[in-house]
Amino acid sequence: MSGPGGAGKGTIARALLDSDPRLTLSRSWTTRDRRVDDVQDAYVFVTRAEFDVRLHAGGFLEWNEFLGHAYGTPVPKESGDRDLLLEIDVAGGRQVLDRLPDALCLFVDAPNDDELRRRLIERGDGRERAEQRVAEAARERAEAEDLGYRRVVNDNLDTAIVEVRDLIDAARAGV
């Protein structure tokens, strides 16, 4: 699951994890500071040196730098009959698709840039940072479309959760 900051990926992911015992979340590593809206287990927060050690040991399924910070998804351990949910950026999604071409890739988006900007500022991003993220969102949308991501517009949270759940169920059924 990818999408711009403020689109609601984390909220949708938490709702799915709470309602679907066959899903498990991969905790990404990041070198950025914890934000006030980060849930306790949102990321593994590490120094750049710690991140680089794991990176050079081949310990990430995908990784990327975004606005000055590194993010990476650890190589997953066996999850049995559970499906692994990744919250990653589109560049990471490209890396996953290179390794797992049948992966279901979803792009959660805000209904428009004004709403995205409002959400970012409301969650604590400054105006300048929000503008950077809005500009990056346009690039991510285009890349996600090129990669064949399924787009889910989060203009109503309950509807977006149901839409994502339906896409996961369809992928499980091979549809």
Image: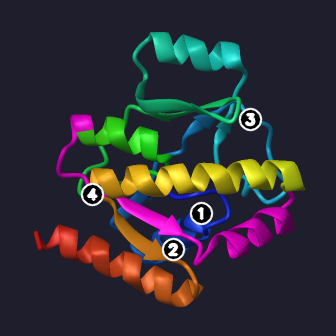
x and y, in percent, of residue 42 in the image:
65, 51
- Decide if residue 22 is on the left or right side of residue 33: left
Q: Earlier in the sequence, mark 2 or mark 3?
A: 2
Question: CB atoms at circles 4 and 3 under 8 Å apart?
Answer: no
Find the magenta span and give its range.
Answer: 98-124
Q: Which residue corresponds to mark 1?
A: 10
Using the numbered discs, state the Cα–Cα distance from disc 2 to disc 3 in whole angstroms. Answer: 26 Å
Q: Is mark 4 on a helix, strand or loop?
A: loop
Q: State the quadrant of the N terminus.
A: bottom left
Where 151 sits versus 146, above or below?
below
- The three-letter code of the residue at mark 4 reads Gly
- The three-letter code of the residue at mark 1 reads Gly
Instruction: Find out whether residue 32 is within the magenta segment.
Output: no
Q: Which residue corresponds to mark 2?
A: 18
Q: Bin the neighbour count of mark 2 within 10 Å (Cα to Cα): few under 14, some 14-19, many 20 and up.
A: few
Of 71 and 47, which appears nearest the observer? 71
Q: Which residue corresponds to mark 4?
A: 148
Q: Is mark 3 on a helix, strand or loop?
A: loop
Where 75 sits versus 81, above or below?
above
The residue shown at (70%, 75%) is 115
x and y, in percent, of residue 122 in the image:
84, 69
Q: Earlier in the sequence, mark 1 or mark 4?
A: 1
Q: State the quadrant of the C terminus.
A: bottom left
Q: Is residue 41 visible?
A: no
The residue shown at (79%, 60%) is 37
Which mark is on residue 32? 3
- Decide if residue 57 is on the left or right side of residue 122: left
Q: Is mark 2 on a helix, strand or loop?
A: helix
